[in-house]
Image (cartoon, rainbow, N blue to C red):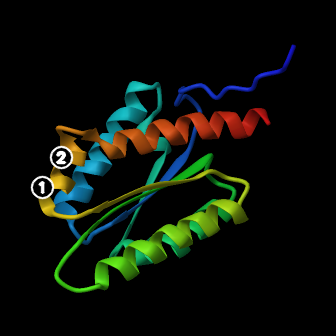
Amino acid sequence: MYTEIIGTLEGQDKRFAIVVSRFNDFITGRLLEGALDCFTRHGGNEKNITVVRVPGAFEIPPVAARLAKSGAYNAVICLGAVIRGATPHFDYVAAQAAKGIAQAAFACDVPVIFGILTTENIEQAVERAGTKSGNKGWDAMISALEMADLSKKI
């Protein structure tokens, strides 16, 4: 027989930081709304959420790392939207945001959740911010709730 450790989805007594980019705010604002809605529906109190706004997705990783290292939060959620354009800018920003968030997650004892949309076009971003494909901000909060509880149990 084996031992299994599973994280629950309870927001009570949990404190989270959400780092959200202002760039593409018409998308990231909806991601933030989804994350906050998820948190309160799972028993969390919005007073236990700190939202930090940064210019764009590229600026998210260093802020997320500082918040995670502060010891004040059970998890840090990173929300942004990088939408492909006509130049290679998308590739650089998306790659560095993903790499930086992964580095923050590995360097800290606090879960750092990747909630950055990387889409080919605006339509795909809109779909993932609350229409056809659900709200990826909600999904990021679900991951944060589970990982925060799992981290506590390990």
Question: Toward which corner of the image does residue 80 lie, by quadrant?
Answer: bottom left
Residue 137 on image: x %, y % = 35, 46
Element carrying mark 2: helix
Q: Amino acid at mark 1?
A: Glu
Image coords of residue 83 (percent x, y):
23, 68
Q: Looking at the rendering, in which quadrant would you find the C terminus?
A: top right
Residue 61 visible from this viewpoint: yes
- Can I make out residue 70 in this image? no
Task: State how far apart marks 2 and 1 are (Cα).
Answer: 6 Å
| Of residues 102 and 37, the one drawn nearer to the viewer in this rendering | 102
Which residue occupies 47% across, 25% down?
Answer: 43
**Is mark 2 in CB contact (under 8 Å) with mark 1?**
yes
Residue at label 2? 127
Task: Give me the residue at 77% from left, 22% from top.
Answer: 4
Looking at the image, which residue is at 51% across and 40% down?
Answer: 143
Residue at 55%, 75% in the rendered image:
62
Decide: few, some or many residues near mark 1? Use Cα within 10 Å; few <14, some 14-19, many ≥20: few
Residue that label 1 marks = 123
